[in-house]
Image (cartoon, helix red, strand yellow):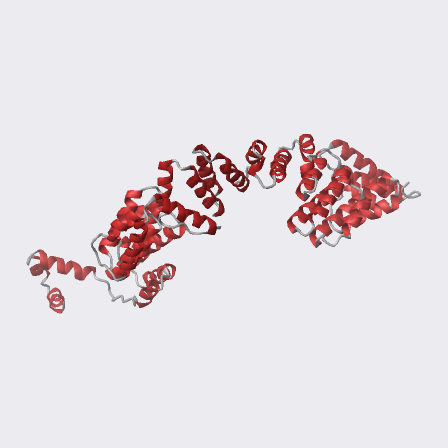
Amino acid sequence: MLRLSSLLLAGGLGLLLSAGPAATQSVRQVLQAPTAATTVDEGPMWAALAAGDLRLFEELELRARRKSPGWQPSAALARERRERELRSEVGEARSAGDPAALARLSTTEPGLFGCADPDNLWALAAAHRRTGDEAKEWEVHERAVRECPFEIRLTTLQKAQGRYDAAQVRKLLDLPGNRSPGEEALRREIDGILSQRAYGANVRSLAALVDKAGPGTTAPAWLAGLERQIAGRRDGRAALLLGWWHQKGGAPAEALRWFDQAAAWGASADANKGLVAAYLAGGDPAKAAEIVRRDPSAASDPEEVLGAARAAMVHRLLEAEDFSACLEAVADPLLAERSDMAAARGWCLLGTDEPRASLAAFEVAERLAEDDASLQGDARKGQVAAIRALGDPHELERLLVLPWIDRPLRQELEIELARRSFLTRAEARQWGSANEAAMELERRGVPLGGAKDVLWAGWVAMRAGDCWTAMARFDRLKNDADTEIARDAWRGWWDASRSMSGDGCS
């Protein structure tokens, strides 16, 4: 570089340019080089990537570019950043349970789904399973068993137990690869299952499982294969066992499928009990009731099942606001001692504009609820609605002293009581106390109601002899959009103002 500068200073530029393309390129580089070297410490950026903090990395990178225009991250740093971004994208797809995203990333970035990232590999297998692509799922398991270190191979085989039947797991075990001593225990387990392939033995094993089944119970690896065998043999008794397995495990829809099969394959009497239980658990008591009407022995308490079906009908009618039909349905003696049905009766009565009877029904519902907080809450909510619908200040006052009224509701009810008191006293021509109730609402910043209520409050104030208050209320309405209200407000305002110089508002 020094020699090139000397030549330029000596006027040797022509010689350099005639020296060929290489020399010309060197001159161009010299002329285009920055006037000062720009150095950026990439250490903090590497540290941010190592910590998985891409946001911090971007902040550091932006700061470096501002400080040193023209700076570009090193190729190694750029590669590391891209890999971190891709890994983050894979992690997000895994967390979101997005099988399509995982499948796409495995195609565009296959390097992230290899033995170096076994969790990604297993997540990819699960993604294929969720999309129903069993061939690709098997391919992922097979690749992990063939190519990965023995720890990953063994874990993959163990995972396969929960997905495939014993014969398929045995196929994976027989694949070449990095075997480990731990496989022998797994092989013995698979061989033990295969040695009990006899159909009757597996059905007896299923019966033992049903006795211990409960919500969250994990299904053994061989159960899927047994289900296929039961379907192939059309075995009603074994299908009944499968129905109870799923019912006890909290899967009523799957239980229904097997109970239906059991009934179709000759075990209808016992299947009816399972169908009733599954329909009730699945939220369809009407179908359970249909079976109980045909076969009362299908339920330990037939009346309870029939009552559940009737209650479901009541809820449907209430939601449809068919209040008359609702009242007819809820009168069923089977529902007489149920708190939720007493509350439903209260809402139906409220819907037919019978607040007094509605209040009584909600009070019965609270009594029947005993210590059930949820049922008590529903009953009390209904009482508040019924008392409000009554519009009786005395009932509102009674409600306010109840211990379960919380502070926000209490404040709301106090305002409502003040409004009711104003209207009640005004209707009784108790002008002074009615005006005081209205003024209390105004002091709280609570609207008296609509324009007609304010107009009425103005006349109440005049009759109470409070001309100033009357004028203020009328004044608010003189420009009301309703011309009739505006006209009455003007008339009231003039009457009040004239009365100021006379004998008062009368």
Q: Residue at x 34, y 47 (%)?
A: 127
Q: Is residue 189 visible?
A: yes
Q: Residue at x 37, y 44 (%)?
A: 200
Relative to 385, say whether 89 is above or below: below
Extreme residue in the bottom direction: 2
Q: Is residue 110 visible?
A: no
Q: Residue at x 47, y 52 (%)?
A: 212
Looking at the rendered image, the quarter that the C terminus falls into is: top right
Quarter of the view holding residue 66: bottom left
In the rendered structure, the answer to whether residue 175 lies left or right of residue 490 reads: left
Looking at the rendered image, the quarter that the N terminus falls into is: bottom left
Relative to 109, say whether 73 is above or below: below
Quarter of the view holding residue 199: top left
Nearest the camera: 412 or 359? 359
Residue 502 horizontal/vertical position (percent): 92, 42
Count up the numbered dots: 0
Residue 371 horizontal/vertical position (percent): 68, 52
Nearest the camera: 4 or 198? 198
In the rendered structure, the answer to whether residue 402 lies left or right of residue 200 reads: right
Extreme residue in the right direction: 503
Residue 257 horizontal/vertical position (percent): 45, 37
Nearest the camera: 386 or 264? 264
Nearest the camera: 216 or 211? 211
In the rendered structure, the answer to whether residue 173 lies left or right of residue 283 reads: left
Residue 375 horizontal/vertical position (percent): 66, 47
